[in-house]
Image (cartoon, helix red, strand yellow):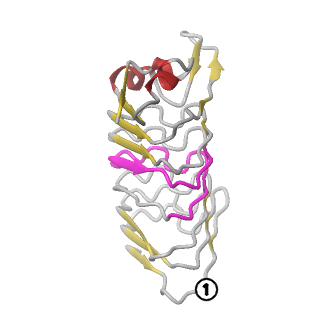
Amino acid sequence: LTSVNIPTNSKLESIEGLTDAGAFQGCSSLTNIYIPQNTTTIAAYAFHGCSRLETIKFEINSNLKSIEEYAFYNCTNLTNIIFPNNTEIIGMYAFYGCKTITNIDIPSKVQKIESYTFKGCTNLKILNIPSDSRLTSLESEAFYNCGITIFTIGLTTPPKLNYKYVEDSYNSYRYAFDSKTFSNCTVKVPVGYLDIYTKNSAWKQFDKITEE
C-alpha cells in the first residue's frame, strides 16, 4: 500500500484508530494520503509509524476538527502539513518525531498545544501563530528537541507556557520549548506589545524577542 485516496464525495467522518490498531498503523510503504471534506476526525494511532509517508492533502473546505494522539507519530518522512482551518484539536504526540517537517502554521481554532505534540521535529525551523488565534496555552515539551529559529506570534496576550518539573540529573523545569530554542529562536510579537512579552515570567526566557 503506497497511496490512500478517499473519494471527494465520501461520507467518511473518521479515520479510526486504537492503541496498536490504527487504521493504517505501520504501513511502511504508504507515501501519500488524501483526506476528503467530510472527514472530521483522524483518530489515535491512525497513521502511527508510517515511516515513508511524505504528504497529507486535505480537500478544500475540509471539516477536519480533530487530529488525535499519536496519529502521525514517527512519520519520519512527512514534509510540511497545511492544517485545515477548522482544526480545533491536535493531540499529544500527534506529530512526535516527524523530523522532516520544516514549518508549521497553527490553525486559529486550536486553543491548546498539548504536551509532546511536535517533540522531536528536529528540522522544524518556522512556527507561526496567527493574530486571530484562540490559543491560550502551550503545554510542557510540546516543541522540545526542535530546531525552531523563527517563531511569529500574532497574539497581544501571551499564551501560557506551562511546564512540568522533572527530577533527573538536572532537576529541570520543562516548558514547551527547550533551552536551545529559548537561546537561539527569534520570537516576533505584534508591534506595541514587546514589553508584555519581555516582562512575562515565562516568555522572557526567550533571549531574542522583537516586534513585527
Decide: is 11 above or below 39.
Answer: below
Spot occupied by residue 3 in the image (x, y as percentages of width and height): 39, 75
Residue pictured at 52% horizontal, 24% vertical: 196
Lateral position of residue 125 relative to residue 129, left or right: left
Residue 57 magenta = no
Depth check: 114 or 169 in front? 114
Depth check: 122 or 84 in front? 84
| Picture quadrant of residue 175 | top right
Spot occupied by residue 207 in the image (x, y as percentages of width and height): 38, 18
Report the span colored magenta. 85-112
Which amino acid, by three-letter code, is at mark 1? Lys
Residue 105 magenta = yes
- State the residue lying farthest toward the right: 18
Residue pictured at 38% horizontal, 22% vertical: 180
Spot occupied by residue 198 in the image (x, y as percentages of width and height): 47, 20
| Residue 124 at least partly seen | no
